[in-house]
Image: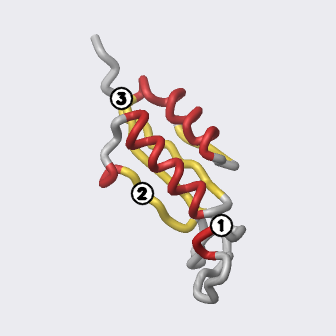
């Protein structure tokens, strides 16, 4: 019998660029639909991450007020592979079970 349990996994990133790369890994390597992936500030502040990345280096309206969180609900049998993908994309923290 297949395991149909769903797990929410979250990863935090220092830049929006790294978060976007993680989303691409989820979509291309794991077949997760983009509407099922959520990207948001890891805090209550509006932010593009804690560091500048290529697209926001010279933008005055790109605040660096905190980390970016990517979250997704996945099947239990995808947990280790998705955790590894988040790490490969530059996650500074990964949580979920």
Q: Is residue 81 above or below residue 2?
A: below
Say which of marks 1 and 3 sits in front.
1
**CB-based contact (under 8 Å), mark 1 and mark 2:** no
Q: Which of these two is toward me, 79 or 89?
A: 89
The first of marks 1 and 2 along the sequence is: 2
The first of marks 2 and 3 along the sequence is: 3
Q: Which residue is mark 2?
A: 38
Q: Residue at x 30, y 16 (%)?
A: 2
Q: Is residue 50 above or below residue 62?
A: above
Q: Residues within 10 Å of mark 2 (few under 14, many from 20)?
A: few
Q: Quadrant of residue 94?
A: top right
Q: Which of these two is toward me, 95 or 19?
A: 19
Q: Is residue 28 above or below residue 11?
A: above
Please give left or right for residue 67 compared with residue 25 in the image. Answer: right
Image location of residue 31, percent across then percent down: 34, 36
CA gap, disc 2 and disc 3:
19 Å
Q: Residue at x 66, y 47 (%)?
A: 90
**CB-based contact (under 8 Å), mark 1 and mark 3:** no
Q: Tag on residue 83? A: none
Q: Which residue is mark 1?
A: 53
Q: Residue at x 66, y 82 (%)?
A: 58
CA gap, disc 1 and disc 2:
20 Å
Please give left or right for residue 51 compared with residue 1 in the image. Answer: right
Q: Residues within 10 Å of mark 3 (few under 14, many from 20)?
A: few
């Amino acid at each position: 019998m297949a395991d149909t349990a769903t797990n929410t996994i979250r990863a935090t990133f220092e830049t929006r660029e790294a978060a976007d790369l993680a989303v691409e890994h989820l979509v291309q390597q794991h077949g997760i639909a983009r509407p099922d992936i959520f990207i948001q500030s890891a805090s209550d502040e509006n932010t593009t991450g804690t560091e500048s990345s290529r697209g926001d280096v010279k933008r005055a309206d790109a605040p660096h007020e905190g980390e970016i969180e990517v979250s997704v609900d996945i099947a239990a049998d995808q947990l280790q592979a998705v955790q590894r993908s988040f790490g490969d994309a530059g996650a500074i923290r990964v949580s979920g079970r």
